Image (spheres, rainbow, N blue to C red):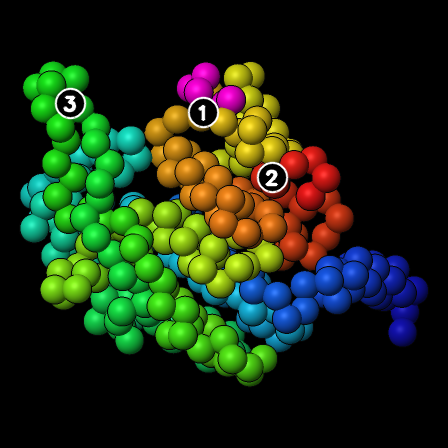
Amino acid sequence: MNSNQKPKGKKSAAVLLEGLPYILQFRGKIIVVKYGGNAMQSKELQEAFCRDIVMMKSVGLNPIIVHGGGPQISKAIEQAGLQSSFVQGLRITDRQTMDIVERVVIDEINHDLVQMISDQGWPAFGLGAGLKGGLIRARKLSLTVVDPESLMPVDFGFVGEVENVVTEKLGLDSVDSEIPVIAPIGIDGSGQSYNINADTVAGAVAEAVQAEKLVILTNMPGILDQQGQLISYLTTDELDSLARNQIISDGMLPKVRCAQHALEGGVHTVQIIDGRIPHSALLEIFTDKGVGTLIANSHSD
């Protein structure tokens, strides 16, 4: 061994040892990861994310993946000659749009993600309408928003909300279980499928399984203050204040809502992190520094 190899070896060992306390702390715990944004569009980031998930599973954690698909859906809608319309971060989904959403989210994104995770060395399986369906029992979204121009309630179409999560379908009964990969499509009692915001699904799943952590990957460093600076730690009360003062808005609103509901429902912490950083999920869970914004019910959590 030459002299240059020793420092590298020490550095590698230090990195591994830094993660050991967290591996012991979270071993056997459920970590729900919402996968979306640019992390889904870069081949390098896709592979890094899938390796992160297999790493978590290999050291004894129980990761559950909930993926989005917004940019891919928008592209497919544009290619079909249609337009996307959003209200409060939610996509208006008519029948034609719903058909596109299902095709892109289930047949393309979910299928490919399951394959990529499996290729990294641990089997995964897809869940969603038509994919061992019935995990997410849904109903039509009950949110009432008035259009400022027509003064009429906005019809979100086939946008749904989570009614129930059938946790038995996740198959988390052993350390060797396959990794669940969930598409954000729910189904009601009549068999009608609904497009559900992936952040909302992730929060509902995390609450249903009483996850230790909910980790949400975004295209931002985390939650930012009025000056555009990263806020590293927030309580739910502080989060409410930011939302009321419209410092948090647009696409971050569903993430904030799902974080609040998950914490109220028993999830220990929520982390909103920068998915553009390779291995950001591992950095958040297994290092002292972490990345992004950590949200908890109080500063003592």
Is 186 above or below relative to 81?
A: below
Q: Amino acid at mark 3?
A: Asp
Residue 147 badge:
3
Q: Tell me the quarter of the picture where residue 243 sits.
A: top left
Q: Is residue 265 magenta?
A: no
* Residue receiving disc 2: 297
As measured in the structure, the alpha-carbon distance from the residue carrying label 3 to the one carrying label 2 is: 34 Å
Question: Earlier along the polypeptide chain: callout 3 or callout 2?
Answer: 3
CB within 8 Å, label 3 to label 2: no
Residue 4 versus residue 48: which sits nearer the camera? Answer: 48
User: How many neighbours does mark 2 have within 10 angstroms: few (below 14), some (14-19), or many (20 or more)?
Assistant: many
Is 258 above or below relative to 251?
A: below
Question: Earlier along the polypeptide chain: callout 1 or callout 2?
Answer: 1
**x then y, percent, for residue 278:** 56, 52
Q: Secondary structure at mark 1?
A: helix
Range covered by the magenta-colored residues: 241-246
Q: Given this view, does label 3 or label 2 mark the residue nearer the observer? A: 2
In the image, is 202 to the left or to the right of 149?
Answer: right
Residue 243 badge:
1
